[in-house]
Image (cartoon, rainbow, N blue to C red):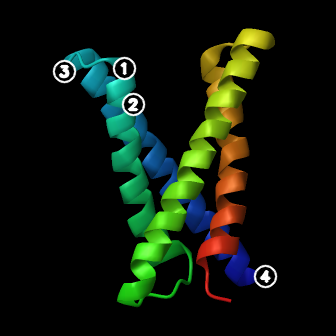
Amino acid sequence: MQKLIKQILRFGVVGGLAFLIDYGILAFLTEVVRLNYLLSSAISFSVSVIFNYILSIFWVFDVDSGAKKQGRNFSVFLILSVVGLGINQALMWLQVEQFHLYYLLAKIVSTAIVMVYNFITRKLFLEKR
């Protein structure tokens, strides 16, 4: 149980930092560089996923580290992350467009839900058994 609590805390730190990286790069590329927000979002998402993967593999989850497993682990991580992004976008749309919540509040709710999804799926699919 203590190992699980430690993992959850570490996962929260990594997720929080990845969230800041994602939004910082998104805002910078859109507002300063003047890229289209969809292109900025794709770039910021990609950078944050790579950051999140590296820290999750080396600091949060106990995964097989052999060279053969690393490609598989990254592929699984990326697929799970893309699904998480889809869940986030659907929740954002639902909350803002259907329930008329302020988008920043909707983002907090969506992030909390997706964070639970991310932890459970990464633990199930990435961690050694």
Q: Is residue 23 above or below residue 58?
A: above
Secondary element at image label 4? loop
Identify the image quadrant of residue 104: top right
Q: In terms of secondary structure, where does tag 1 sit?
A: helix
Residue 89: x and y in percent read 62, 30
First reached walking from the N terminus: tag 2 or tag 4 = 4
- Asked if residue 22 is positioned above or below residue 57 in the image, the reply reads above
Q: Element at badge 3?
A: loop
Residue at (49% x, 57% y) in the render? 78
Location of residue 24 with respect to 112 vertically, above or below: above
Upstream in the sequence, badge 1 or badge 4? Answer: 4
Residue 110 occupies which quadrant of the picture? Answer: top right
At a point 67% along the width and 45% down the height, the residue shown is 114
Number of marks = 4
Circle 4 is placed at which residue position?
1
Q: Amino acid at mark 2?
A: Ser
Q: Label 3 to label 2, Cα distance in Å?
A: 13 Å
